[in-house]
Amino acid sequence: MSKRPVKRFIKSTGRFAVISVILIVGFILPLLSVGSSYADPIKLLHRLLQQSTDLTGATSVHTFRWKYPDTELLGAIEFDYCTNPYANLSCDAPDGIDVSGATLTNQVGETGFTILSQTTSQIILTRTPFVVNPALDNLYEFSNVINPTTAGQYAVRVKTYTSADTSGLVNDDCDIAFSTVGPITVNAEVPPFLFFCVSEFITDYCQSSGRTFFDFGDFDTTQTNTAQTQMQIATNAQNGYTITMGGNTMTSSNHIIDALSVPTASSVGTSQFGVNLRANTSPAIGQDEQGIGIGTISPDYDTPDLFKYGKDDVLASAVTGSNYNKYTVSYVVNVPPDLPAGVYNTTVTYIATASF
């Protein structure tokens, strides 16, 4: 600030003297000069960052896309990975980001770039400076990028330069947002199961069934006495299942109806007790295996019209987990004329064992 000299004006007015003081103050403002390497930078158009995976800490491919807003001299592109997109804040690298081993695997539009330098959070591309074509769609693809290890929202600050080494004017200055997410883990348990039911008849999935006691009435030496039951099974056991048959042949006191030890045809008038798991014609009884499971009938019980009874024999099995199968067990009893009188009975048990 400078002060000019004070001038005094005196005017005589009789007995009084009036003094007028005029103070003039002047300000001298220094010239403000600001230097900058920016040439009024603007934003890249239609900018986008695509990630091959957004999982935290994963190795990803980062593909950048944009259009240049106008014709401009372009020699270098700088990519800075930051925790925020704000140019007025420092660019702090996201935790775990690592582009130091990234490679430029593809470029489209304005091409001819190679990697000039790179750190864990920055990549600089360079080429011989050349004027861009704003009509082109541009793509720059980097492989082997390690994503940030913390889930969140991040930004890549992108600058383009007129020089090949970022020393010249900045043409474009903008940010491109991206994010990472933690892996989603879903846990569930499939409990082991074994469905098994036995009865006179069974509807699908063991929903309903019939009786489990059968009375042949009086045996007749001139015909075969028959009965049938069904059993249904399913399991998710890794090593499948087996169905075994237990119990003895029909007896009355110490009198016995012979169990068929090998697959044998039914013969009226002889001593026979046996079963099979097939549809038979002599006698007409039984049904073939049903269902979409993979269970199979054991060979000794798998031939129509041939019957056998072996205590603890395996009737059917599956080598791995199986959906439902329904098996029909046919029983045949033949008696000889000299069979002693009495009440003949037996209890047949079926045991299903799953191998988990």
Image (cartoon, rainbow, N blue to C red):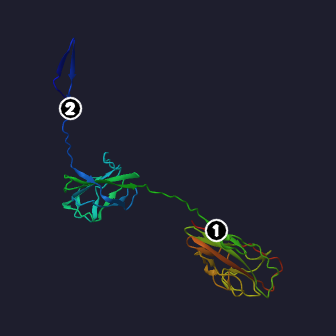
Point out the image quarter for the C terminus.
Answer: bottom right
The residue at the far top in this view is 15
As helix, strand or loop, the secondary structure at mark 2 comes to loop
Residue 45 horizontal/vertical position (percent): 31, 59
Type of amino acid at the residue the image marks with label 1: Phe
**Residue 149 appears anywhere in the view:** no
Point out the image quarter for the N terminus.
Answer: top left
Front residue (pair 88, 260): 88
Q: Which residue is mark 2?
A: 27
**Residue 304 appears anywhere in the view:** yes
Left or right: residue 131 versus residue 238 is left
Q: Which residue is mark 1?
A: 195
The residue at the far front in this view is 14
| Discs 1, 2 touching: Cβ within 8 Å | no
Left or right: residue 81 versus residue 270 is left
What is the spatial separation of the Cα atoms under label 1 and label 2, in whole angstroms? 101 Å
Of badges 1 and 2, nearer the viewer stands: 2
Residue 63 horizontal/vertical position (percent): 33, 61
Task: Residue at 68%, 78% (x, y): give it.
Answer: 328
As helix, strand or loop, the secondary structure at mark 1 comes to strand
- Disc tally is 2
**Quarter of the view holding residue 298:** bottom right
Type of amino acid at the residue the image marks with label 2: Phe
Residue count near mark 2 (Cα–Cα under 10 Å), binned few <14, some 14–19, many ≥20: few
